[in-house]
C-alpha cells in the first residue's frame, strides 16, 4: 500500500470521527445564576502586543442555565492601522452570579473574556492566545436594552 | 550525345512554315510534325532563292541552368564517307554557343566525323526543350542538311518566401495579421504547401490565400496572409518568432520569420505615476454616527525611485453597523498619514510608528514623524510623535521619541538605541531605554544578534537583554530567541521573558517539516501574571505537483490572573489538510481534532474546570479566473458540552466575486454571497446575504453599491435589516515627476513633404521606441510615452509593411512628435540594347551594370541589373528621380541616352521604364586588300563613312563600295582598333579619314589631347604604347596627325604631333582578344611595324 493511500485513508478516518463527534449534543439545565440577556454597548482596549481600541455591540440572545450565546460586532482601531470591522458569535457561561466567562469568535481563534458582572455592566479582561505573545486587553460592557 | 540524321528533303511548305515558327519561338518538340520515316527529317527554307535544306533528327544536350554541355553532331548519313563536309553552326539565340562555328571535316578511317558544339545553359532557362542551334552540313553535289541541337533544361525548383513586415507589435489578446510573399524562383511551375509555426498558446485562426497549397508558375508570386490570435496571457512577454514554412514535394524549400513583440497593456507598465483616488461613501439602513464619509488616497511612484502612500478621510466618526457598511466599500474613519519612501529611505508623517527592538521598545505608534535609512554601511531610524488612540486625529498623553543607529564594522553591525516612550492614550505604557547591540555572522548563513539595554519602566527599572540566532542554509531555517525585558508588554516589549525556537527543514523537494516551541511570561498591567507556552510540528508532503498534504500536531495553553479572576485554557490538537489545484480550480479540506481544557477561578473563590473534545471539519473549493471567481466553502465545528466553546456550529457559503456583467454600456462587475450559520437546533439558523455591483464609468469614475443583511449584527432597525452602502470614486493616474510625457503620431505622408497636412491619416501598428520603452500606434496612429527618458521617439522601421518607408526625420516640438511614413513605388527599369541603324542589336550581358535612381535631395537608390537588362527599384519613396547608369563594367561599350531619364513617383504602385542603350559608334577604314601592300593599308584611302554599332564588326556590311578593302575599326571613345576579315573586307564600306574632329569633340577625351615633339627613335607604335598603352593603337595617333604625317613609317625629329594620352590601359575590345578571328594579332594583314 502506497504511502499516499495510507495518508488519504487517515484523513478520511479523521473526517468520519469528526462527523460522529458532531452528533453529540450539549446540555445544561437549571436557572441561570445571572441574567445576561440583552444588548450591551461594548468597549475594549487592547494592551498588548500593540494598543488598539474596540467599540461595538455585544448581544446575548440566548441563555439556558449557565450557558449563553450571542454575537459581538466591533470596530477595532489600532494606533497605526486602518480600522477593522469585526463580528462573530459569542458562546460562554455564567460561572456564578458575578462572573461571566465567554469566547467571542471574531476570528477562528476565540477571544476569551473573563468579566465581573455588576447589574447592567460587565468589567474584565480578555486574551487571545497565539504562538507567541498573546493579544490581551480589558473590556467594559453596559446593557442598553434587556 | 549525338544522333545520326537521316536526310530527306521535305517539300511540304506547311511543314516548313510550322518548323520555322517553332524555331523562332524556341518551342519544344519542334520537330515532331516534321519527323520523317527514317528517324526524323524535315526541311526548312533558307531564303527565297535558296534551295531547301534537309532537316535531320535533333541532337539533344541535357543540362541544368548555369552549366555547359558539349554535344557531338555527326555528319548526317546523306553525305558520302569519303567526302569532305563543311559545317556551319548557327545559333538560334536562345543559348550561347561556344567553340568553332565553321569549318570542314575530312574523311576519317575511324568513323564518321563529328562537330563538337558547346552549349551554355542560361541561368534563367525554363525547364524543357529548346532548339538552340543548327549545324548545317554542306558538301559539293549534296543537299545541305541542318541538324538541330535540342537543349533539354533540367527542372530546377526554387521557392522563396519573404515576410512583408519584419516586425509586428501587438498586445495580448490581439488578432495579428502577418503577410508573406511566396515566389517561384525555379524554372518550372511548382506546387507549394505553406505551414505556420507560432509559439505555444498562440492560435492560427485561419490562413489564406484561402488554402495552404498554392500552384505557382515560374516567376509568379502570391501573397500569403496568416491570422494569429495572441493569448491574453502573453501580454508583456516580449518578442516571439512566427515562422512560415514553404514546402514542395514534401521538402522544405524556404521559410520566413517574423518577429512579434507582445507589449504590456497600455498603462500597465512601470512608467505611470501614483494613483490618486478621491471619493465619497454613504450608508443607509444603519445607525451610529455620521453615515457619510469623504476620503482620498494616493499610492504609487512619485519619481522613478520614490513612491508615496497616503490617506485622508473626513473626521466624522462612524460606529457600529454604519462603520461596517462603509468598511465594506473600503472607507474607514482613520487618521491621515503620508509616507514617502524609496528603496533606501522612508519618511512618514501623520499616523506613524516605529519598532526599535525587543528591549528598547516595540510598537510605538502615534501622530508625528518617523524616518528610516538603510545603507550598505549605515542604517538608522527615528521617531518623534504623540501617542494616538487610533481614531480620528485625537492624540493621547505621552511622548514617543527614539533613535536607533547601526554601523557596519568589519562583518558586524554595531547598534545603539535610545528611546523615551510614554503612551497614556489607550493604556499606560512607559519606557526609557538605552541599549547597545551587535549582529555578527557566526557561521555559514547564520547570524547571532544580541542587545543589552537599561530599561526604566513604570514602577521599576532593570537590565534587559535579547539574543537571537538565525540561520538559513541547506534547506534548514532556524531561529532561536531568548529575551528578558523588565516591565514586559507594559513597557513596549513582547513579554517580560521569552524563550522560543522555530525550525523548518526540507528533507526532499516534496517534504517539509516545520515546528516551533515557545514559553512566555508577562506582567502586562492587564494581567498581574500571564504565562503561555506551546509547541507544534507540521510535516508537509507534496503528493503530486498540484496536491499537498500536511499534518499538524500542536499544543498551546495559557494561565492569566486579572481583576476578574484567574483563567486558563489548554488545547492539544491533531489535524490534517489537503490542498489541490487543477488549472483555475482549487480545493482545500482540513480536519482537526483536539482536547480542550478550561479553568476559571473567580475573585470570590468559585472555580470551574472542564475538559472537552473539539472537532473541526472545513472544506472549500473554487474557480478563480481573470473573469471573476466562484467559491463554495463549508465548515463543521463540534465541541463538547463545555462552556465558552461553540457547542456545535456549521457554516456553508457560496461566494462570487468580480464577475463581469456584460453589455451595460460600461464595464460592470458583480459580487454576491450567501452564508448559512446553523447550530443544529440549539438556535435558529441564520443566513447572511451580501450583494454588490461596481461600474467603471467614463472619465475614470467608478460607482459601487453594496448591500448586506447580517442577522448576527444589531442595526438601528434591529437584526436582519439590509445595510446598503454607496460609493462614488474617481481614480486618477498621476504623472511621475521627472518624466517627460511625449505624445505623437505616425502619419501617412502622402505627398512626401515631411509635414502632416490635412487629410493625411494616421498609420496604425507601427512600433515607436524611446529608451527601453516601446509603444505601438493605435488605429489613429497615436502613441504616448510617459517615462523619464530623454530624446525623441524613434520609429522602428522594421515594423513598417513592405512598401512603406519613413519620410525623413520626425518632427519633435514641445513634447509632441510627428513621424511621417510614405508609400513607395516599385519601378522596373528595362535596359534595351538598341542598334544605331536598322540592324539587329548584339547580345550584351548587362549584369555588370548598375541602375542608380537619384532624387532631388541627392539620395540614391541602386539596383543591380540582370543579364537581360532588368533592374528593380523595389521601394522608391514619393519624389522626382533621375536615372543614372553605370556601365563601366559592361564588356560591350554602350552609349546612354544623351538626356538622363527622369520619372516621378506619386503613390503606391508599380511602373516600368525602358531605357535604350546604343551601341558605340565605330569607324570603318578601308584597307588595301593585299597583305603585301602594307603602306597602302596604313595610308587609308578616302572613302565613305558611317557610325555603325559595335555589332557591325561581326556583320558583313550590306553596301560594299570598296571590294577587297579591309576595315580598320576604331572606337572613338576608347581608341580600340580592329580590322575586318578578308571576307568581310570586301563588303566593307569605304571610309574616309579617322575622325580627328570626333575625337576632339568627344568629352571623354577633353584634356587628353596634348602636343608632342618627336624625338630620336620615336615610332608610332612606341608612342601608342606610351600614350595609349597598346602599340596596336598606333592608327589612332596616325589619324590624329594625318595632316603632318605623310608616312606612318617615317617620323621626323622635332615634328609637332598631337597625341591622345590615356591615363589607364583601357579594356581591350573583344575584337582584340586572342583567338578572335578579328583580332589584329591573327590578322594576316597586320600592318608592318612603323
Image: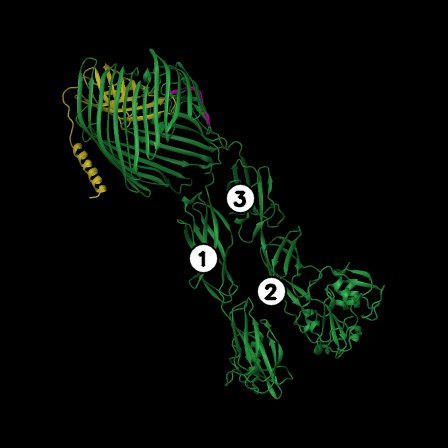
Chain colours: A yellow, B green
Q: Residue furthest left?
A: A30
Magenta part, dominant SS: strand
Identify whether B354 is placed above or below B744: above
Is residue A62 left or right of B505 when viewed as pictured? left
Q: Nearer the viewer, residue B420 or B917?
A: B420
Q: Nearer the viewer, residue B657 or B901?
A: B901
SS for callout 2: loop
Q: Quadrant of residue B701?
A: top left
Chain letter, disc 2 residue:
B
Chain letter, disc 3 residue:
B
Q: Please say whether residue B285 is visible from this viewpoint.
A: yes
The residue shown at (37%, 31%) is B444
SS for callout 1: strand
Identify the magenta region: B364-377
Residue B411 in the image: state x and y as whole percent: 42, 26
Is residue B690 left or right of B150 when viewed as pictured? left
Sort mark 3 into few (<14), some (14-19) or many (20+) by Cα contacts within 10 Å: many
For disc 3, the marked residue is B768
For disc 1, the marked residue is B245
Sort mark 2 into few (<14), some (14-19) or many (20+) by Cα contacts within 10 Å: some
Q: Quadrant of residue B577?
A: top left
The disc, 3 or 1, on the residue closer to the chain's N-terminal end is 1
The disc, 1 or 2, on the residue closer to the chain's N-terminal end is 1
SS for callout 3: strand
CA separation, marks 1 and 2?
A: 30 Å
Quarter of the picture containing the C terminus of chain B is bottom right
Identify whether B1011 is placed above or below B950: above
Sort mark 1 into few (<14), some (14-19) or many (20+) by Cα contacts within 10 Å: some
Residue A87 is inside the magenta segment: no
What label sits on residue B867 in the rendered view? 2
Residue B287 in the image: state x and y as whole percent: 33, 23
Amino acid at each position: 500500500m502506497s504511502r499516499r493511500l495510507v495518508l488519504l485513508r487517515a484523513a478520511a478516518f479523521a473526517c468520519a470521527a469528526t462527523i460522529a463527534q458532531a452528533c453529540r449534543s450539549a446540555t445544561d439545565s437549571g436557572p441561570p445564576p445571572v441574567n445576561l440577556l440583552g444588548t450591551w454597548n461594548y468597549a475594549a482596549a487592547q494592551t498588548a502586543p500593540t494598543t488598539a481600541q474596540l467599540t461595538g455591540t455585544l448581544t446575548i440572545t440566548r441563555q439556558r442555565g449557565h450557558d449563553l450565546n450571542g454575537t459581538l460586532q466591533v470596530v477595532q482601531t489600532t494606533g497605526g492601522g486602518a480600522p477593522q470591522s469585526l463580528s462573530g458569535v459569542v458562546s460562554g457561561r455564567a460561572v456564578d452570579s458575578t462572573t461571566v466567562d465567554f469566547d467571542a469568535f471574531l476570528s477562528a481563534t476565540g477571544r476569551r473574556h473573563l468579566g465581573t458582572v455588576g447589574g447592567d455592566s460587565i468589567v474584565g479582561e480578555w486574551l487571545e492566545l497565539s504562538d507567541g505573545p498573546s493579544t490581551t486587553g480589558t473590556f467594559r460592557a453596559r446593557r442598553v436594552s434587556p | 550525345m549525338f544522333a545520326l540524321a537521316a536526310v530527306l528533303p521535305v517539300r511540304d511548305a506547311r511543314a516548313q512554315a510550322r518548323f520555322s515558327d517553332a524555331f523562332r519561338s524556341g518551342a519544344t518538340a519542334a520537330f515532331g510534325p516534321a519527323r520523317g520515316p527514317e528517324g526524323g527529317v524535315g526541311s526548312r527554307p533558307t531564303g527565297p532563292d535558296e534551295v531547301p535544306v534537309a532537316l535531320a533528327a535533333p541532337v539533344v544536350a541535357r543540362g541544368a541552368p548555369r552549366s555547359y554541355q558539349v554535344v557531338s553532331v555527326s555528319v548526317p548519313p546523306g553525305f558520302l564517307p569519303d567526302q569532305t563536309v563543311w559545317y556551319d553552326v548557327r545559333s538560334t539565340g536562345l543559348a550561347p554557343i561556344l567553340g568553332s562555328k565553321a569549318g570542314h571535316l575530312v574523311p576519317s578511317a575511324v568513323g564518321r566525323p563529328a562537330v563538337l558544339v558547346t552549349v551554355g545553359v542560361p541561368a534563367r532557362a525554363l525547364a524543357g526543350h529548346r532548339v538552340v542551334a543548327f549545324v548545317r552540313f554542306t558538301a559539293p553535289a549534296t543537299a545541305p542538311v541542318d541538324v538541330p541541337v535540342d537543349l533539354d533544361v533540367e527542372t530546377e525548383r526554387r521557392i522563396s518566401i519573404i515576410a512583408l513586415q519584419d516586425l509586428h507589435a501587438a498586445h495580448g489578446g490581439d488578432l495579428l495579421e502577418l503577410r508573406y510573399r511566396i515566389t517561384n524562383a525555379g524554372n518550372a511551375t511548382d506546387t507549394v504547401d505553406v505551414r505556420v509555426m507560432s509559439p505555444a498558446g498562440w492560435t492560427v485562426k485561419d490562413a489564406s490565400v484561402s488554402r495552404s497549397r498554392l500552384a505557382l508558375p515560374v516567376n509568379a508570386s502570391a501573397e500569403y496572409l496568416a491570422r494569429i490570435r495572441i493569448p491574453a496571457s502573453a501580454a508583456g512577454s516580449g518578442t516571439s518568432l512566427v515562422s512560415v514554412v514553404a514546402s514542395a514535394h514534401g521538402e522544405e524549400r524556404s521559410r520566413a520569420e517574423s518577429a512579434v513583440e507582445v507589449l504590456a497593456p497600455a498603462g500597465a507598465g512601470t512608467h505611470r505615476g501614483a494613483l490618486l483616488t478621491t471619493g465619497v461613501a454613504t450608508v443607509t439602513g444603519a445607525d451610529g454616527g455620521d453615515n457619510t464619509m469623504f476620503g482620498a488616497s494616493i499610492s504609487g511612484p512619485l519619481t522613478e525611485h520614490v513612491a508615496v502612500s497616503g490617506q485622508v478621510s473626513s473626521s466624522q466618526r462612524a460606529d457600529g453597523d454604519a462603520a461596517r457598511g462603509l468598511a465594506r466599500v473600503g472607507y474607514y474613519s482613520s487618521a491621515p498619514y503620508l509616507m514617502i519612501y524609496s528603496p533606501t529611505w522612508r519618511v512618514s508623517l501623520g499616523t506613524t510608528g516605529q519598532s526599535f527592538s525587543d528591549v528598547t521598545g516595540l510598537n510605538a505608534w502615534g501622530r508625528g514623524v518617523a524616518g528610516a535609512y538603510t545603507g550598505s554601511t549605515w542604517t538608522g531610524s527615528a521617531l518623534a510623535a504623540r501617542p494616538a488612540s487610533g481614531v480620528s486625529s485625537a492624540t493621547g498623553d505621552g511622548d514617543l521619541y527614539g533613535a536607533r543607529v547601526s554601523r557596519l564594522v568589519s562583518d558586524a553591525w554595531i547598534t545603539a538605541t535610545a528611546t523615551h516612550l510614554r503612551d497614556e492614550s489607550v493604556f499606560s505604557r512607559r519606557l526609557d531605554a538605552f541599549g547597545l547591540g551587535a549582529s555578527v555572522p557566526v557561521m555559514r548563513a547564520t547570524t547571532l544578534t544580541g542587545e543589552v539595554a537599561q530599561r526604566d519602566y513604570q514602577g521599576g527599572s532593570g537590565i534587559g537583554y535579547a539574543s537571537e540566532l538565525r540561520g538559513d542554509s541547506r534547506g534548514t531555517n532556524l531561529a532561536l530567541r531568548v529575551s528578558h525585558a523588565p516591565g514586559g508588554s507594559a513597557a513596549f516589549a513582547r513579554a517580560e521573558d521569552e524563550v522560543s525556537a522555530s525550525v523548518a527543514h526540507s528533507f526532499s523537494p516534496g517534504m517539509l517539516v516545520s515546528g516551533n516551541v515557545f514559553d512566555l511570561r508577562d506582567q502586562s498591567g492587564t494581567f498581574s501574571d500571564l504565562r503561555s507556552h506551546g509547541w507544534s510540528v507540521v510535516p508537509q508532503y507534496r503528493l503530486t505537483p498540484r496536491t499537498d498534504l500536511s499534518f499538524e500536531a500542536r499544543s498551546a495553553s495559557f494561565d492569566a490572573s486579572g481583576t476578574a479572576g484567574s483563567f486558563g485554557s489548554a488545547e492539544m490538537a491533531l489535524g490534517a489538510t489537503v490542498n489541490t489545484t487543477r488549472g483555475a480550480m482549487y480545493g482545500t479540506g482540513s480536519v482537526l481534532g483536539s482536547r480542550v481544557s478550561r479553568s476559571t477561578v473567580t475573585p470570590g473563590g468559585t472555580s470551574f474546570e472542564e475538559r472537552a473534545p473539539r472537532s473541526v471539519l472545513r472544506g472549500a473549493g473554487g474557480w478563480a479566473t481573470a473573469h471573476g471567481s466562484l467559491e463554495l466553502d463549508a465548515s463543521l465545528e463540534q465541541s463538547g458540552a463545555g462552556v465558552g466553546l461553540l457547542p456545535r456550529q456549521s457554516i456553508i457559503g457560496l461566494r462570487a466575486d468580480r464577475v463581469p456583467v456584460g453589455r451595460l454600456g460600461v464595464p460592470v462587475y458583480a459580487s454576491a454571497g450567501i452564508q448559512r450559520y446553523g447550530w443544529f437546533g440549539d438556535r435558529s439558523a441564520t443566513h447572511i446575504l451580501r450583494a454588490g455591483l461596481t461600474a467603471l464609468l467614463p472619465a475614470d469614475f467608478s460607482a459601487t453599491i453594496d448591500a448586506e443583511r447580517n442577522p448576527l449584527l444589531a442595526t438601528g432597525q434591529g437584526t436582519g435589516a439590509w445595510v446598503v452602502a454607496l460609493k462614488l470614486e474617481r481614480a486618477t493616474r498621476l504623472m511621475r515627476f521627472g518624466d517627460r510625457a511625449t505624445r505623437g503620431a505616425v502619419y501617412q505622408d502622402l505627398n512626401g513633404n515631411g509635414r502632416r497636412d490635412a487629410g493625411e491619416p494616421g498609420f496604425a501598428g507601427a512600433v515607436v521606441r524611446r529608451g527601453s520603452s516601446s509603444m505601438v500606434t493605435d488605429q489613429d496612429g497615436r502613441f504616448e510615452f510617459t517615462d523619464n527618458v530623454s530624446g525623441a521617439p524613434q520609429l522602428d522601421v522594421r515594423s513598417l509593411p513592405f512598401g512603406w518607408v519613413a519620410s525623413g526625420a520626425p518632427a519633435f516640438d514641445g513634447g509632441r512628435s510627428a513621424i511621417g511614413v510614405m508609400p513607395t513605388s516599385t519601378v522596373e527599369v528595362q535596359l534595351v540594347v538598341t542598334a544605331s541603324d536598322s540592324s539587329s542589336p548584339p547580345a550584351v550581358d548587362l549584369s555588370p551594370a548598375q541602375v542608380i535612381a537619384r532624387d532631388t535631395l541627392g539620395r540614391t537608390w541602386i539596383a543591380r541589373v540582370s543579364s537581360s537588362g532588368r533592374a528593380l527599384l523595389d521601394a522608391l519613396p514619393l519624389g522626382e528621380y533621375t536615372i543614372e547608369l553605370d556601365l563601366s563594367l559592361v564588356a560591350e561599350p554602350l552609349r546612354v541616352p544623351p538626356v538622363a531619364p527622369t520619372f516621378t513617383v506619386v503613390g503606391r504602385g508599380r511602373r516600368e521604364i525602358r531605357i535604350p542603350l546604343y551601341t558605340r559608334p565605330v569607324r570603318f577604314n578601308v584597307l588595301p586588300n593585299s597583305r603585301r601592300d602594307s603602306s597602302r593599308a596604313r595610308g587609308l584611302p578616302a572613302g565613305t563613312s558611317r557610325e555603325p554599332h559595335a555589332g557591325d564588326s561581326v556583320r558583313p556590311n550590306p553596301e560594299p563600295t570598296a571590294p577587297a578593302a579591309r576595315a580598320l575599326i576604331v572606337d572613338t571613345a576608347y581608341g580600340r582598333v580592329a580590322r575586318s576579315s578578308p571576307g568581310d573586307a570586301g563588303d566593307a564600306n569605304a571610309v574616309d579619314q579617322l575622325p580627328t574632329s570626333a575625337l576632339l569633340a568627344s568629352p571623354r577625351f577633353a584634356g587628353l589631347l596634348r602636343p608632342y615633339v618627336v624625338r630620336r627613335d620615336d615610332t608610332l607604335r612606341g608612342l601608342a604604347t606610351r600614350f595609349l598603352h597598346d602599340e596596336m593603337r598606333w592608327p589612332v595617333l596616325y589619324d590624329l596627325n594625318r595632316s603632318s604625317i605623310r608616312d606612318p613609317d617615317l617620323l621626323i625629329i622635332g615634328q609637332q604631333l598631337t597625341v591622345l594620352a590615356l591615363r589607364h590601359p583601357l579594356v581591350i575590345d573583344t575584337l582584340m582578344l586572342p583567338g578572335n578571328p578579328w583580332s589584329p594579332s591573327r590578322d594576316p594583314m597586320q600592318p608592318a611595324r612603323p
